[in-house]
Image (cartoon, helix red, strand yellow):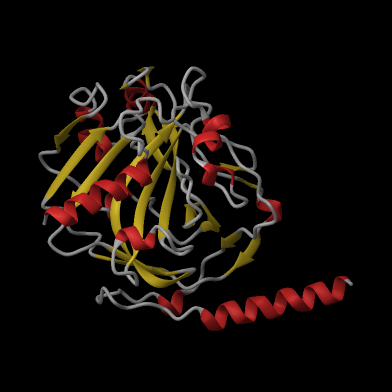
Amino acid sequence: MLVELTVLFWITGLVYGSPNHPGDEQSFGYDSGELDPPHWATEYKTCSGKYQSPIDIEEDLVTKVNLPLLRFHNIDTLPTTTSIMNNGHTVVLQLNYSAPVMISGGPLTPTYKFTQLHFHWGVNDSLGSEDLINNHSYPMELHMVFTNTDYDSDSIALTKNDGLVVLASFFEITKEDNPVYSEIVNALDIIHMPDTSTFLPNGFTIRSVLPESTEHYFTYKGSLTTPPCLEVVTWIDFKHPIRLSHNQIQAFRMLRSKHGQLTHNARPVQELSGRPVWYNVGGFANLNIPNTSSGLTFDFSIFNMVMLLCCKLATLTLL
């Protein structure tokens, strides 16, 4: 158990931004006076990689595809415990289950296991998301992190280019509070200061914090958006946003970091560097079958071969 906890803390430190330089209180941040995003690569060389995240997704430039449905396992189950923490960089929630939450299908060949979720936000309601859509920023973005079950440990997964999947959901402002998020928002007063945590008395299901539709999304290969910015992530950005009130999002901006008020924590967009971005148009109804097996995956290799052949034919035509 001690070994498993050590690995878990190491993994979550990399994924959601805990310092990985012991004794260095300024390992990274988001403002001048800290090691801010333009200077991350001076200490974390992998943050200067070619395929970094986030990006600006231009809808006119994406490739439209019709992928199999994403398949979720155990997302309607309440966790046994739910912890929420202000780690000085973001708000992260750890949901503990007797049986793991899994995802497969869509652009994914392996099955991935849920690890944690966290948020990114901006100084006001006009910006805050990390990925942009047509150069438009949403006020906040939710990241659900999953690790590849093909590998023996999460630490090994972090060394592989298909090691992680992040489900990203955007938020837009509405007049009414979203009751699903009330318990999270109410807990922010308790974790006002960095490195504080508490448990949610009730918790929530993964399905309840997903967008109403998970059929339409953008997907691309990229990186973690915090140091060390490892390029091991398949990103799935849902098209349809989730609604929160201004007051609910404003509560996140009132949190404290080690350097002051945590008013924002979004990394600026990075160069696309020729990467393809796919948009799933939906309509793959014949695969709308519940996944009842945590080991069930869809073999996507044939689809990839067809897509590659089409791209080569298109290139020959242009020449």
Name which residue lies at 50% across and 51% down: 223
Residue 195 on image: x %, y %: 23, 28
Which quadrant does the C terminus fall into?
bottom right
Q: Quadrant of residue 311?
A: bottom right
Q: Quadrant of residue 308?
A: bottom right
Which quadrant does the N terminus fall into?
bottom left
Residue 76 on image: x %, y %: 22, 59
Tell me if 103 is positioned left or right of 94 in this view.
Answer: right
**Residue 250 visible in image:** yes
Name which residue lies at 59% across and 49% down: 49
Q: Look at the picture and state if 241 lies above or below 282.
A: above
Name which residue lies at 30% across and 74% down: 290
The residue lying toward the viewer, choosing from 196 and 74, is: 196
Tell me if 181 is positioned left or right of 285 in this view.
Answer: left
Residue found at the very far bottom of the displayed protein: 302
Name which residue lies at 32% across and 78% down: 296
Q: Look at the picture and state if 133 lies above or below 279.
A: above
The residue lying toward the viewer, choosing from 306 and 30, is: 30
Residue 34 on image: x %, y %: 46, 22
Residue 13 on image: x %, y %: 32, 43
Q: Quadrant of residue 159?
A: bottom left
**Residue 131 visible in image:** no
